[in-house]
Amino acid sequence: MTNMERHNYDVLIIGAGGAGLRAAVEAREAGLRVAIICKSLFGKAHTVMAEGGAAASMGNVNDKDSWMVHFRDTMRGGKFLNHYRMAELHAKESPDRIWELETWGALFDRTEEGKISQRNFGGHEYPRLAHVGDRTGLELIRTMQQRIVALQQKDGRETGDMESHIKVFAELTITDILKENGKISGAYGYWRESGSEVLFEAPAVVIATGGVGKTFKITSNSWEGTGDGHALALKAGANLVDMEFLQFHPTGMVWPPSVRGILVTESVRGEGGVLTNNVGERFMFKYIPEVFKNIYADNEAEADRWYLDQDNNRRPPELLPRDEVARAINSEVKAGRGTEHGGVFLDVSKRIPADVIKKRLPSMWHQFYELAGVDITKEAMEVGPTCHYVMGGVEVEPDNAAAIGVPGLFAAGEVAGGMHGSNRLGGNSLSDLLVFGRRAGMGAIEYVKNNGANPVSDASIKAAAARIEAPFSREGGENSYSLHAELQEVTHNLVGIIRTGKEVEEAIEKIADIRKRSANVSVAGGRKFNPGFHLAFDLDNMLLVAESTAKSALRREESRGGHTRDDFPGMDTTWRQVNNISSFDGKQVNVKSQPLPPMPKELFDLFDIHELEKYMTPEEIAKGGSN
Amino acid sequence: MSGVFSPGRAKIKERTLRTDKWWIEPAITFGVLFSFIIYATFRAFENANYFAEPLISPFYSPCLSTACQDGASLIGQPIGTLAIFGMVISPALFILIFPLGFRMTCYYYRKAYYRSFWLSPPACAVAEPHEKYTGETRAPLIMQNAHRWFFYAGLVFNVLLTIDAVLAFRGPVSEGSEVMEWGHMSVGTLVLLLNATLLWGYSASCHTCRHTIGGRLKHFSKHPFRYKLWTRVSILNHYHQQFAWVSLFGVAFADIYVRTVSIHPSLNFYFF
Amino acid sequence: MTRKLNLRIWRGDATDGALQDVVVEANEGEVVLDVIHRVQATQMGDLAVRWNCKAGKCGSCSMEINGKPRLACMTQVASYGDDETITVTPLRAFPVIKDLVTDVSFNYRKAMEIPAYEHPKDLAPGDARMEQIDVERSQEFRKCIECFLCQDTCHVIRDHEENKKSFAGPRFFIRIAELDMHPLDMLKNRKRTAQEEHGLGMCNITKCCTEVCPEHIKITDNAIIPMKERVVDIKYDPARMFAGLLKRDKRN
C-alpha cells in the first residue's frame, strides 16, 4: 500500500476488449471522465481472435433478412434460454453498431454495390456476418482503439491534455471492486509491471473482462481469460447466471501441439470444408437433430448444391450450430472413429482450389502454415472441441447492462450472461460487444448523473491492500502454476464437454480442496512483472468460476446447448423455464433456480407454434406470451 | 552511448546477436556494385571502342559530342567538343549522369547501397556505426526526391536505346554499297534488344512508375483503366530488385560486347 | 519426440542484466514461446514474458530470437538446428522493464500523434458506399497486429535514441498511408504532415520493417514508398513544379 496511486474518475471500465472500449466511447461522448483498465497492452484483448464476423441483419446480401429473423435465429441457437429482451435489443441494434464503426474508419469487405459484405455462418438463416477477411475482431478492436485516440485528440485540442477525459491504464490488474454503503465506490489493483498498487475512485464500474477459458485445459482463450470479471462481480455481491453453459468450439486444432486449442473458424466450414472420421465418412449427416431436419440437407448431393444455390437447397450439416457439431465430433471420437490425437478431420483442400482458400481464409492458412507447418490448402486439419466461450455471466438488466443487486456496477460482453442462452451463435459475440458495450456506457452515464461520487473508506483500502500483500508474506506454500494445472485437469475431465452427475460432484470436491490449498499460495521473487504473483490472483478468480460452473452443471438435470449431461441426455421443457443463479456468501458459491422472464406476445408470435412446442411446456404455449 | 546501448535498454554488449551470415548479402552487393563502378568509370573515360556500326554501346548513346566516332551520333552533336587542359572530355560523361542518377535515386538501389556502402544499417537488427542519422531529410540526400525527374529522363534513354537496337537490324556494308541495308540481324542485335528490354522492365517496375500510373489515385474504381495498369505494374514492381540487377548486368554486358566487336569486328556473328 | 534444448535467456531490468543459460525440454511442433513457458513453470517462476493469444494474432510476444525481432509464438523450435543454442532477449529498441518485457509506450504515444480518420460530415451511418478495390490497399495495412517488430528493427530509432522525438516509425507510416488511401477520409494534409511532422523523410527504405513483419505487410513497397511519392507529388514533382501547381497543393 506504500506509494499507492490514487485516481478519480466518473466511470471505471475494467477490460479493454470490444465491449469495454465501446462503453468507454459512449461514456466519453456524454462528457464523462473515463478510465480504461487493460490487463495486457492496449489493443491486444481477446476480441482480436474473433475471425468470422459480426452478425447484423443489414440485409446487404439477402434483403429477406431483418431483426426478427436474427432474433429468431439467436433464440433458436440459445435453445430459448436467452433473456428475450437482450436477444431483441441485440438483433435490433446491431446494424446501427456496425454502420457506426464505418464512420470511425472501419473498412469491411464490400459487396458489388459497395455495401458491407455479409457472409453465411452456422445458425444464421441468411448471410449476416459483416467481416474483413478472417480478421474481423482485429478490425473491430482497432477501429475502437482508434476511435478512443480520436476522442483523446479532441480532448487535447479542447483541454490541452489528451488524457483529460479518457486514460488507458495498460497492464494493470484489478483485484477488488470496492463498495461503500452498498454502492460501488471504485476498485483496487496493481500495476503488473511494477507490482505497485492503485486505487480508483469511481461511482460507476463497467466490467468487460471477457471469458473464463483458462479454467480449462484445452482452450482457445489466452492467459487473460481467467474469469476476473465473473469473480469480481460475485465478490461484489452480483449474481452469475447459467454458468454451466460453456461453448466448446467444435473445431479447435488438436494437433500439432504448438497450435493446440487454436480455433479453426466456422467460415472454413462455411466456405465448403467437410468433417470426416478416420474411415473417411462424412459423419455429420448422422447427427442432424429433429428440430433442424427441415433446414439441413440429409444427403451429400443436396449439401454440395447449397454452396451454389442457397435458395433451393438445404444447408450442409457441417453448418449446424456449434454444440451439435461439437457433440457429433465427441461421439465419433468416443466411438473410436477419431484420429490418433483424439480429433476428426476437417478438410477444405479437396473442394476448393488453393488460391481461393488463401484469398478467402488468409489468416487461417498463414497461421497454421507458420505456426505448425500445416498447409490447409493441401492437407486436412485435425480438429476437436476446445473451450471457447462462456454463455453464462453476470446477471444484468438488459436495457442498461446494470448488474442486478449492485448499484453502480455494469457488465457487458462475454462476462455478462443471458444474451446467448444456452448456446451462442457464431458472429453474435462481436455484435453483442457493440450493442451491450454501448448500453453499459449509457447505463453508467445515467447512473453517474443520479449518483454523485462515493468516496472509498480507508478500511476498504486496507483490506484490499492486505490481499495483495498476502502471497508475499507466506513462505513455502503451494506453487500457483501447479495448482492451476490441477484445476484445469479437474475441470476438463469432470466438467468438460460431456458431464455426468457423479463426475461433477467429484469435481466440486476437488475444486474445494484446491481452493483450500490456494489460500496458502506463496510467491517467489519480487513484485516487478512477476507472472507467479499475477497467477496467484488469477487462480483465485478461476476457482470461483469453476465452482460456480460445476455447481450449476450439477443442478441442471438436462442437456441443452453448451451443457451436456450424459445422465440426462434430453432437453427438458421445465428446465427451460429457469436460470441457475450463482451467488457468493464469502465462503462458497450457492446456486439457486430462478424463473426466466416470459417472452412478450409480439416476440412470441414471431415463431411458428410448432417450433415453440419443442421447447416450451403446453401451458406456456397456451398462454402465448406474457401480454 | 547511443542506439542499442542507450541507458534503459537491455544491457547486451554485442552489436547484434544474429547467428546467421547476415554480412554476406551486403558484402556481395558491395562487391558487385563496386566492380560495376570501376568498370563504368574506366569505360566512361576510355573514350574509344564504343561504336562498331551498327552497334553502339549504351554507355555512349546518344553520343552528343563532335568528339564522337563517325556515325555514332543518333540525334546530332549539340555539345560540340569540350576539353579540359587539352584533354577531350569523353562523350559518355555528358549522358551517364542520367542513367546513373536514375539508379542512384532508385528505391531499390538506395536500400542496397545504404546497407552495403554506408552500413546504415548493414543488416536488420545489426547496429550501424554512425553516431548521427538524419535520413533523407536534408541535402544532399533530400535529392533522392528527384527520382521522378530521373525516371522521366530514363524513359527518354529507353527510347533512344530501343532505336539503337532497331538500327542494329541493319547489315554489314556489302560491296558496291555505301550504306548498311536493313533486314539483317546479328548477335549484337540481340544484345542491344535484350539490353533495351531489360531497361524497359527496370523502368516499368519502378516505384515511381507504379505511383504515376495509378498509385497516386484515391479511388481506383473511378479510373478502371489506370487501375488495371497499376495492378500490372504492381506485379512487375514486386520484381524491381531483380530487374535492377539484370538490367545492370545487361548494360555492362552490352557495353563489353560492343567493345569487343569494335576491336574484333569479325566476332559479331550475323544470323542473316 | 522430446529433446533437450539449450536456451539463453536475457534476465534483468533497466539497471543491469545478463544472458542466462538453461536447459529445457522441447517437444515436436513447439514454438519458442512454449519452451519459455516451460522454463517459467519449472525453473524460473518469476521470468517476465509478455504474451496473449499464442496464435500470431495479437502481437504481444515480440522479442529477439537469435538477434532477430520475432514473435515467439510464431517461431518454431524446429527451425533451429538440434544442437543450436537459442538466444532470447527483449526488444533492443525500447527500454527494458524486466527480462523479456520492454516498455513499448513510445508506440502508443506515436499513435496518439497521428490525426484520426475524418468521416464525411454529410454521410450518415449506413450510407457509405465503397468499392472493394478502393478499400483493399488500406485493408492490407489494417492487418497490422501492432507487435511493433517493425519499430524495433528500424535503425532510425533502434540506433538513434534521439530520433524518437521526430520519427513515427513504420507502424505509423502504414497508418498514415491507410488513412491517405482510405476512400472516404476527409482530412487533407496527411502527406505534408507525414513529411514535416512524422519523419517520413528519415526513412532510408532499407526495408527491415518489411522483413520482420509477421503479417507480411509490404510496409516499404506499399506504404512508405507510395507515401514518399505522394510527398513528391506535392513538394518536388517536376511537371507540377513548372506548371506552378505545387502552390495549389498546399492543403495536401
Image (cartoon, coloured by chain):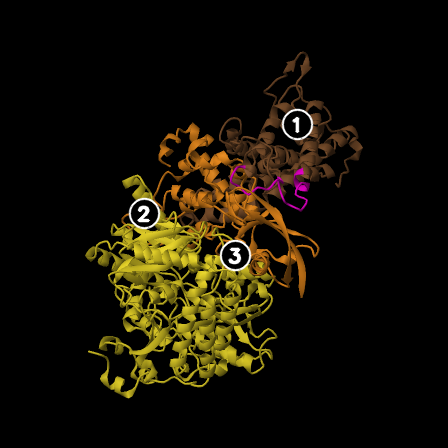
Chain colours: A yellow, B brown, C orange
Q: Say which element carries label 3.
A: loop
Disc 3 designates what residue?
A524
Res C243 → quadrant: top left
Was residue A55 drawn as part of the magenta stretch in this picture? no
Residue lying at 60% horizontally and 68% vertically, measured from the top left? A379
Residue type for callout 1:
Tyr
Residue type for callout 3:
Ala
Residue lying at 52% horizontally and 67% vertically, measured from the top left? A485
Q: Residues within 10 Å of mark 3 (few under 14, many from 20)?
A: some
Q: Nearer the viewer, residue A416 or A334?
A: A416
Cα–Cα span, label 3 and label 2: 42 Å
Kindly report which numbered mark, 3 or 2, lies closer to the viewer in this rendering.
3
User: What residue range appears in magenta?
Assistant: B6-26
Quick check: A199 above or below A610?
above
Was residue B7 drawn as part of the magenta stretch in this picture? yes
Quick check: A189 above or below A564?
above
Given the image, what chain letter belongs to the residue carrying mark 1? B
Residue B127 x %, y %: 59, 38
Residue A491 in the figure: left or right of residue A279? left
Q: Main secondary structure of the magenta part?
A: loop
